[in-house]
């Protein structure tokens, strides 16, 4: 099989869905001739035209509001929000309006809307362009949240998201764009809400997602423990069946995320593990996450703020030395 980058996998998924369905179109700031903040849509205007690759004014609230209306009207919009931090600017349209329409209409209205956004630090972009705000999103009923870790998952999950009749937040970590992986040339879709066991183990379960999958794999190699690694792939719905099966086997859990520790994804998963697997646990649940401070612009300080492979190694050593 061929090997391509994460960004190429995203681009392929978008191209194939735009070609497959004339109702699919894209909206976003600088996605036209410029090709998007990270170059995902480069060349799309020439291929699909300005009607389907719509460059918009700088208003995230307008973007999501207009797109929700288009979705209700039968179109399948894909919105690009440059940085995940900017999702805060469209929260009224997203939280109070778009995500409610299906429920308050008793299922009569569908809102097939995909919101793509780039998240995470590591590039020195500072406190307002480096956040991982997925904990804010998981508390919103009705949202699907997808966060792929590999090019293979990125393509299969994005195609599935575009065909879904619900609102999907599709999160792409900035540091994954250049990573490479095996991606089939033939069409495939992956189910939203299904985690994947990346490697089998007996001593401890690592639960993670996005770029910390590779950090977890690297840390596990430095440990003498038999480590099972679960890649969540989707945060909502959350695949508790796969998580529970792994935890009941190993009895020990480490949850790793890029967002802040307090109120994070790890806190929610830890609560659900306690509710579903308490009798199987024989060691306190460990959490590895960013420090509870705004992310600094300085590379040295940013590195100290975000979780690292060494933090995962240290969490594994606590279990090893028990």
Image: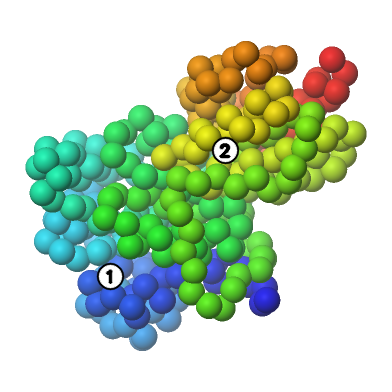
Task: Please identify the residue farthest to the bottom as the structure is shown.
Answer: 46
Q: Name the residue under label 1.
A: 24
Q: Which residue is drawn at 54% across and 69% down?
A: 9
- Colour logic: rainbow
Helix, strand or loop at mark 2: helix
Q: Which residue is drawn at 14% across and 56% down?
A: 72
Whether label 1 touches label 2, CB < 8 Å: no
Asked if residue 244 lies left or right of residue 201, the reply is left
Asked if residue 34 lies left or right of residue 288, the reply is left
Q: Which residue is drawn at 50% across and 46% down?
A: 194
Helix, strand or loop at mark 1: strand
Q: Residue 242 carries which label?
A: 2
Q: Position of residue 249 (x, y in %)?
A: 70, 29
Query: Measured along the vertical axis of the image, is residue 270 above or below residue 290?
Result: above
Query: Measured along the vertical axis of the image, is residue 111 above or below residue 10?
Result: above
Q: Which residue is drawn at 55% across and 45% down?
A: 195
Q: Position of residue 316 (x, y in %)?
A: 79, 28
10 Å neighbourhood of mark 2: few (<14), some, or many (≥20)? some
């Amino acid at each position: 099989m061929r090997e391509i980058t994460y960004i190429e996998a995203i681009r392929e998924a978008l191209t194939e869905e735009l070609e497959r369905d004339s109702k699919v179109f894209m909206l976003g700031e600088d996605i036209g001739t410029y090709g998007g903040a990270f170059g995902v849509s480069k060349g799309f205007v020439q291929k699909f035209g300005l009607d389907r690759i719509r460059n918009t004014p700088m208003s995230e609230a307008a973007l999501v509001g207009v797109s929700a209306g288009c979705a209700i009207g039968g179109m399948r919009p894909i919105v690009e929000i440059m940085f995940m931090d900017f999702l805060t600017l469209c929260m009224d349209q997203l939280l109070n309006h778009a995500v409610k329409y299906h429920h308050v209409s008793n299922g009569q209205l569908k809102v097939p809307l995909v919101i793509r956004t780039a998240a995470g630090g590591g590039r020195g972009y500072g406190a307002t362009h480096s956040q991982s705000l997925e904990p804010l999103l998981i508390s919103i009923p009705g949202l699907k949240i997808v966060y792929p870790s590999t090019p293979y998952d990125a393509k299969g999950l994005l195609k599935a998201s575009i065909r879904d009749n619900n609102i999907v937040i599709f999160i792409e970590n900035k540091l994954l764009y250049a990573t490479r992986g095996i991606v089939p040339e033939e069409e495939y879709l992956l189910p939203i809400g299904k985690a994947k066991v990346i490697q089998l183990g007996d001593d401890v379960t690592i639960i993670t997602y996005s770029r910390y999958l590779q950090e977890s794999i690297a840390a596990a190699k430095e440990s003498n423990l038999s480590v099972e690694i679960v890649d969540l792939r989707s945060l909502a719905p959350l695949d508790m069946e796969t998580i529970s099966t792994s935890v009941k086997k190993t009895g020990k859990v480490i949850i790793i995320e890029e967002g802040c520790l307090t109120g994070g994804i790890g806190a929610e998963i830890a609560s659900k593990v306690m509710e579903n697997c308490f009798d199987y646990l024989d060691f306190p649940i460990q959490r590895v996450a960013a420090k509870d401070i705004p992310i600094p612009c300085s590379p040295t300080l940013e590195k100290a703020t975000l979780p690292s492979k060494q933090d995962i190694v240290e969490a594994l050593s606590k279990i090893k030395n028990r």
